[in-house]
Amino acid sequence: MTQLNVVPFVSVDNMMKLVHAIGIEPMMVELADRIEDDFRRWPSFDKTPRIASHSDVGVIELMPTSDGQTYGFKYVNGHPTNMKRGLQTVTAFGVLADVATGYPVLLSEMTILTALRTAAMSALAARHLAPKGATTMALIGNGSQSEFQALAFRAICGIREVRLYDLSPDATAKCARNLAGSGLRVVPCPSAEEAIEGAQIITTVTADKQFATILSGNMIGPGVHINAVGGDCPGKTELARDILLRSDIFVEYPPQTRIEGEIQQLPPDHPVTELWQVITGAAPGRRDAGAITLFDSVGFAIEDFSALCYLREKLATLSFCEQLDMIADPDDPRDLYGMLLRAAPVVVKRA
Ligand code: NAD
């Protein structure tokens, strides 16, 4: 087989080895820079809201994009009720392909990669929007994504203290345990109100398929940055509408966020700013120290594309992958059938 017929595959096991080889925080720093570079060339990407298949208990989504040379997509689910069955809320895998031939060039697990890229994206947004000198972050929702969020904000935004709250004390204890030794001061809190005390940044990363009120209007004073990660589906939000009306709202791709983000609670013409424009300097970010900035994160295909391209580059030196026989390779490209015939098992006749 030539190299064209095999596709590098990064399993969960190999992803974990690769992340440890690079380092968790260094990898999120590099991912944030990579996403930032791709956001700077935003107009060169094909963009579409992700394609969602909803059910009563969750959603399965496809997230495609292309920059004209490379095509990528992610398969991802969101099932908040999975937790009760001992399963994860979010799992994912992704593919890159060569636009010139249409051949896939990478297949990877993306459950871990999504947690890393989501946290890198959150911290990247905060790098542009959060109040200067922020040192304390409230982290509400202490499930799978939470430690990644805490560490990305430490590495990228200089956060020193995280104040944890989750409906489940077990989740908070797990998060605090995992962050012990990270260099962060970790403060478990008995309520969301106590978690946000003294925090300049508030991250909400809860999972519940309803219009939830993780933060109500009276909890939010001037000057904070809100990183709202958990509301990412129609009918699934985290913030009281009143907070949105008082905030300067920043989004990834408006046609998707209008459907899935916190702003589904607002009229379709409510003004929002696209984050890529803040990154390129085409639009202002934080207006003043008293403004409330809100990153209404839903997760967009370009972030996954950036993460997969980053991964592909890393595999050149860190070969934590297997080669999958995924592309049929007949000697004559028109003779697929002949290739199949020649592979028929030889039947040995007994005398
Ligand atoms: P998870 O199920 O592992 O954790 C969610 C946590 O939220 C649980 O510990 C749960 O107890 C807690 N929770 C639920 N309701 C709460 C409430 N009212 N107050 C406090 N805590 C509450 O899920 P996860 O993998 O950590 O994902 C969290 C959310 O982030 C999901 O909604 C997921 O869809 C979303 N997500 C968004 C992006 C993005 O790019 N924006 C990416 C990945 C995941």
Image (spheres, rainbow, N blue to C red):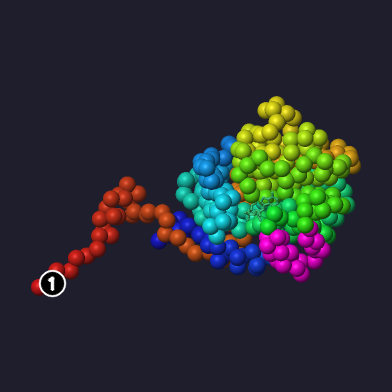
Residue 165 located left or right of residue 291: left
Residue 171 shown in magenta: yes
Q: Quadrant of the N terminus?
A: bottom left
Residue that appears at 71% across and 55% down: 166
Residue bounds of the magenta highlight: 169-189
Residue that appears at 85% across and 52% down: 197
| Position of residue 7 measured from the top left corner of the image (x, y, whole percent) | 48, 57
| Position of residue 274 measured from the top left corner of the image (x, y, whole percent) | 72, 36
Q: Quadrant of the C terminus?
A: bottom left
- Vertical placement of 172 versus 230: above or below? below
Whether ligand 1 has any atom under 8 Å from the Cβ at mark 1 is answered as no
Query: 44 or 198: nearer the eye?
Result: 198
Furthest toward the right, the residue is: 289
Residue 344 located left or right of residue 115: left
Q: Which residue is mark 1?
A: 350
Residue that appears at 55% across and 54% down: 82
Few, some or many C-alpha atoms within 10 Å of disc 1 (few <14, some 14-19, many ≥20)? few
- Vertical placement of 158 versus 232: above or below? below
